[in-house]
Image (cartoon, helix red, strand yellow):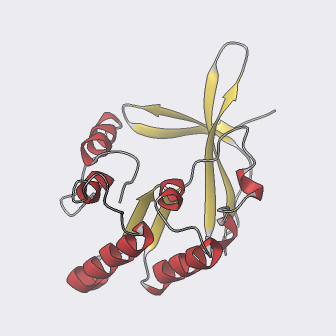
Amino acid sequence: MTLEETTESHLRNMQSLGIDVPDNLLISDYSDIRDRFEVNEEHPDFLDLVYGVINFFKQKEGEKFTCFALDSLGALYSLTDTRNLRSKIFHFFKMLRDNNLTSIIVMENPKFSNIQHSIGSEGFLCDGIIEMGTIETQHDIMLYMQVQKMRATAHSRKRHLIEVGENGISILGPVFE
């Protein structure tokens, strides 16, 4: 489910990375919902809509529905009533676990932001956090990936350089700073 980009944009991005799109992949984007409301009409709480989408596919597909991705949690916050947000997000992650879904939730963390210390920082609720970012050098901007948290798994916490190319993402090795 994407609240940030269109389905077509995600499919183009996958194609540019050489990712084969599985036949059973369904991408639902914000425009599917947004276009159903008049300009002045109040939009529903999108957290409720996400619950509805997950419940629909869990009932329709049963155990075949195993993976859910959301782009992005920040966009969901902006489309959700923020009263009792921590409680709502706690129940959101619980619902994902209760449905036995492997979930990938995108959360932007701007470089010079205090988002880690502000409302909406629910990273402690998820089972894993993988950070992707950039390292600027005098001559280049390099991409890195770092597993900051992965419950019940021994893992490196080092940043690793990555490269995105025609064959997808390649991990080049640890960053030595």
Give above or below for 18 relative to 138: below
Q: Residue furthest left?
A: 23
Quadrant in which the N terminus appears: bottom left
- The image shows residue 48 at horizontal and vertical percentages of 40, 75
Residue in the foreground of this view, choosing between 55 and 41: 41
User: Position of 138 compared to 81: left or right?
Assistant: right
Q: Which residue is more in the foreground, 79 or 168?
A: 79
How many marks the image carries: the answer is: 0
Q: Residue furthest top?
A: 139
Residue 168, by quadrant, is top left
Instruction: Check the image and report above or below for 44 versus 161.
Output: below
The part of the image, by quadrant, that contains residue 139 is: top right
Outermost residue to the right: 177
Residue 123, percent from left and from top: 66, 64
User: Left or right of 93: which side holds 11?
Assistant: left
Q: Residue 175: image x %, image y %?
A: 73, 36
Residue at the spot 27% in from the left edge and 51% down from the top edge? 31
Task: Tell me the quadrant of the picture where the C terminus can be found.
Answer: top right
Left or right of 7? Residue 111 is right
Q: Position of residue 43 (x, y in %)?
A: 36, 63
Residue drawn at 48 percent across, 60 percent down: 76
Q: Is residue 21 above or below residue 63?
A: above
Vertical side of 158 occupied by 58: above or below: below
Report the residue that reaches farthest toward the front: 40
Q: Residue at x 23, y 54 (%)?
A: 35
Report the side of 131 relative to 92 (left or right).
Answer: right
Q: Quarter-wise, where is residue 128 in the image?
A: bottom right
Residue at the image point whose x is 29% and y is 51% from the top:
39
